[in-house]
Amino acid sequence: MGEQEKSQANSNSMQRVKVYRLNDDGKWDDQGTGHATVDYLERSDDLGLYVIDEEDNKTLLLHRITPDDIYRKQEDTIISWRDPEFSTELALSFQETTGCSYMWDHICNAQRSLQFSTLNSETFHSMNSELGELPAVELSTLPLIPETVSESGIADQMGLTELILNDKENVV
């Protein structure tokens, strides 16, 4: 791959940005200029927002993306938020509006994924608590089990089906 192709490939995913942190005096401190991207955090399934310094390739910013509604897009070139882990106000000022839009879309997509997986997890846990009321598996109670399941919601029925299929795969 030629230098120009490498540059174009990197520019598609790495967006040039300045990082700012709000200081105690209410003023924005320039933390440096680098390239931003969204990627998985090391040894984790969580997505993070990385900014790598354009001069020395050190990490200027590493932020775990949260499903909470903390991110704001200001004008066409700024994304800001309050980092809940560090209680710090942060802002990214992009060189180009397309870079800002690109990163904004990636952050929003990551949030949707997190919200979806949280929703699935909550559905699974609520289903487990309802299925915990199933009668003990004994010959005399076998007719009660399908009756109990059929009276539960579709999410519980689907969840039970998934549990049975997973259990069956573990036995085989």
Image (spheres, helix red, strand yellow):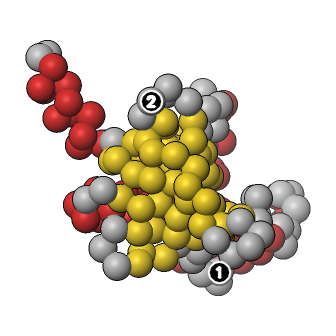
Label 1 secondary element: loop
Front-most of residues 23 and 164: 23
Indicate left or right for 145 with 71 as reference. right
Q: Looking at the picture, how far across and down is residue 58, in whole percent?
A: 56, 30
Q: Real-space Cα distance between discs 1 and 2?
A: 59 Å
Indicate left or right for 57 with 100 as reference. right
Image quarter of residue 11: top left
Q: Residue at x 52, y 46 (%)?
A: 32
Q: Residue at x 45, y 45 (%)?
A: 33
Q: Which mark is residue 85?
A: none
Q: Which numbered disc, 1 or 2, marks the residue that appears first in the sequence?
A: 2
Q: Mark yes or no: residue 60 visible.
A: yes
151 w.r.t. 25: above or below: below
Q: Looking at the picture, how far across and down is residue 113, in whole percent?
A: 48, 60
Label 2 secondary element: loop
Task: Give the amino acid type for the residue marked by disc 1 in the picture.
Answer: Ser
37 w.r.t. 58: above or below: below
Q: Residue at x 49, y 37 (%)?
A: 52
165 w.r.t. 82: above or below: above
Q: Mark yes or no: residue 144 visible.
A: no
For label 2, the residue is 55
Q: Residue at x 38, y 64 (%)?
A: 104
For label 1, the residue is 152
Q: Please identify the quadrant where the N terminus is shown.
A: top left
Task: Give the amino acid type for the residue marked by disc 2 in the picture.
Answer: Glu
Q: Please identify the quadrant where the C terminus is shown.
A: top right
Image quarter of residue 133: bottom right
